Image (cartoon, grey):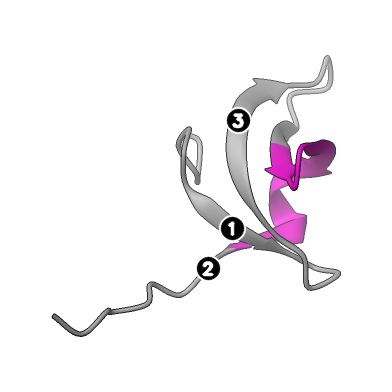
Amino acid sequence: MKKFALGDVVNSDKGRRGVVRAAYKSKEGQQFYAVEKDGAMDYLEEDRLSPAPRVELAA
């Protein structure tokens, strides 16, 4: 089962924050994600990503 959904904001293990744009599995069954940051795409394994904390904005 996928840990992240399309549109989720995530942090990579290198500290970069981005948005999940695609999810797919390798031939070996490992879950990968395409993460967009400033128009560039990174393709990362699921275990290299963590959910970004939600920021509550004051009204």
Which numbered disc flags the more N-terminal residue, 3 or 2?
Answer: 3
Element under label 1? Answer: strand
Relative to 5, is 25 on the left or the right?
right
Q: Main secondary structure of the magenta part?
A: strand
State the CA–CA distance, disc 3 to disc 2. 15 Å
Q: What number is the disc on residue 10?
A: 1
Q: Residue 46 placed where, x, y %?
A: 69, 47
Q: Which element is circle 2 on? A: loop
**Residue at the limit of the structure toward the front, as seen here:** 59
* x 50%, y 36%: residue: 2
Residue 4 vs residue 25: left or right? left
The amino acid marked with disc number 2 is Ala
Taking the spot 28% from the left edge, 79% from the top edge, the residue there is: 56
Position of the C terminus by quadrant: bottom left
Residue carrying label 2: 52
Q: Name the residue that disc number 3 marks.
A: 21
Label 3: element kind: strand
Q: Are marks 2 and 1 in contact (CB under 8 Å)?
A: yes
- What segment is highlighted magenta in the picture? 35-50
**CA separation, marks 1 and 3?**
11 Å
Q: Which of marks 2 and 1 is nearer the N terminus?
A: 1
